[in-house]
């Protein structure tokens, strides 16, 4: 299945049905009076978050979604049938943006969440509505109202607690494969990961978090180098960003400088995103002698400056993995409790998320102009996979 995380569609709500002009014509009932019924309301266009979906690929082949028109009224005071709603299923985590105004209409971040994006037209009135003591044979009706028509941009931002970022081959896919049941493609060449992967890290029956692995960034990514920054939107909802850095890159580059390269690209993409908590995990420590690891990590921590937690890990021999996972779990649980108990903190978090969303939209508009529903040339044929790790 193709992984498509952005699509543009047009939605058209149904028009309201016209009111009916009718008079009673029954035997032995002279001057029967008006009996024209109202029309039916037009159907709405409704988006519904579906947990079974993980891509917007369907909208490449169905760019127009139209609700049913309301039926016109009829005699004998019969009201026209209401138009059927057009219900559109989208993945959980879809943000809906009006293409004309660039306003965010809603964020479907929970399974079953519903959002009316185009309201159906109001029904017209039949002539029965206009009868009175002075106008016993009204010939007035009203037409049904027009349904709303909108062009929408749908953006999928996957739901994860921890987002992994770093240069290609920094060990992101290896880490997610080690701590969850996710099995992304792992190889020794750059850009092995072409689409985001999700893994659920489960420490106990009721203690778990979701980790997201996105394709690697390189210098110039904000300008389109490599795979660019198109997948950084999937870090927008993460509670914490985990930056992976190789301790001994094959090209002989300095790990601290590599960290700075990726963080510069992250800031170029979204200054607001850099306000999320960021930790550093130095990977592939199995390449260093066990006796030298602590001293190396201390020198690296001094080189990058304070303010960030630094972990040393090795997926090959599981060095530091449990410590990292436990620390992430404690942090995420603390964040969940804090945001649930402190409304001011929750409001600040919502404000930061909105600022990140604005940066994501601005970058999306700059990277790719609206051209119907054409797919970007760099969209891959792989899907996002969510797999649960067996309980220990």
Image (spheres, rainbow, N blue to C red):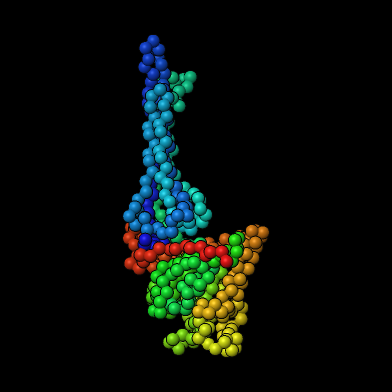
Where residue 38 appears, x then y in whole percent?
42, 30
Where residue 310 appears, x then y in whole percent?
58, 79
x 67%, y 59%: residue = 341
x 60%, y 60%: residue = 206
x 34%, y 62%: residue = 375
Q: Is residue 15 above or below residue 137?
A: below
x 47%, y 55%: residue = 51
Q: Nearer the viewer, residue 278 or 222?
A: 278
Determine whether, in the image, residue 328 is placed left or right of residue 70: right
Q: Is residue 133 above or below residue 149?
A: above
Determine whether, in the image, residue 355 is placed left or right of residue 43: right
**Can residue 387 be seen by looking at this rendering?**
yes
Where residue 347 appears, x then y in whole percent?
61, 60
**Can residue 107 be seen by looking at this rendering?**
no
- The residue most toward the top is 28
Q: Which quarter of the image is occupied by the C terminus?
A: bottom right
Q: Which quarter of the image is occupied by the N terminus?
A: bottom left
| Residue 8 occupies quadrant | bottom left
Where residue 334 appears, x then y in whole percent?
64, 65
Please tell me how many numbered marks the rendered image carries: 0
Q: Is residue 333 above or below residue 81?
A: below
């Amino acid at each position: 299945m193709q992984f498509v995380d952005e699509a543009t569609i047009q939605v058209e709500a149904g028009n309201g049905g016209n009111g009916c002009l009718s008079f009673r014509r029954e035997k032995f009932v002279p001057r029967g009076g008006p009996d024209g019924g109202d029309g039916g309301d037009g159907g709405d266009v409704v988006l519904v978050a579906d947990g079974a979906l993980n891509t917007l690929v369907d909208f490449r082949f169905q760019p127009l979604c139209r609700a049913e028109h309301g039926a016109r009224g009829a005699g004998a005071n019969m009201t026209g049938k209401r138009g059927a709603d057009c219900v559109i299923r989208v993945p959980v985590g879809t943000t809906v943006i009006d293409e004309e105004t660039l306003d965010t209409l809603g964020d479907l971040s929970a399974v079953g969440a519903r959002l009316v994006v185009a309201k159906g037209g109001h029904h017209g009135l039949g002539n029965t509505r206009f009868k009175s003591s002075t106008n016993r044979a009204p010939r007035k009706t009203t037409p049904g109202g027009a349904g709303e028509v909108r062009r929408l941009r749908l953006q999928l931002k996957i739901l994860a607690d921890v987002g992994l970022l770093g240069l290609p081959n920094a060990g992101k896919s290896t880490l997610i494969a080690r701590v969850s049941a996710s099995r992304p493609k792992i190889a020794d060449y750059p850009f092995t990961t072409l689409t985001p992967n999700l893994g659920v890290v489960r420490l106990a029956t009721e203690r778990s978090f979701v980790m997201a692995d996105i394709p690697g960034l390189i210098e110039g990514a904000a300008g389109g180098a490599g795979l660019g920054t198109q997948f950084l939107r999937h870090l927008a909802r993460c509670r914490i960003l985990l930056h992976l850095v190789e301790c001994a890159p094959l090209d002989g580059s300095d790990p601290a400088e590599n960290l700075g390269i990726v963080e510069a690209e992250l800031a170029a993409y979204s200054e607001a995103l850099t306000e999320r908590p960021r930790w550093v995990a130095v990977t592939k420590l199995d390449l260093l002698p066990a006796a030298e690891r602590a001293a190396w990590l201390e020198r690296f921590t001094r080189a990058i400056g304070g303010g960030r937690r630094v972990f040393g890990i090795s997926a090959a021999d599981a060095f530091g993995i449990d410590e990292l996972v436990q620390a992430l779990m404690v942090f995420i649980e603390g964040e969940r409790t804090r945001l649930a108990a402190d409304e001011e903190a929750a409001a600040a978090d919502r404000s930061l998320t909105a600022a990140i969303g604005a940066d994501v939209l601005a970058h999306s508009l700059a990277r790719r102009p609206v051209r119907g529903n054409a797919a970007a040339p760099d969209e891959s044929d792989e899907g996002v996979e969510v797999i649960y790790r067996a309980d220990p």
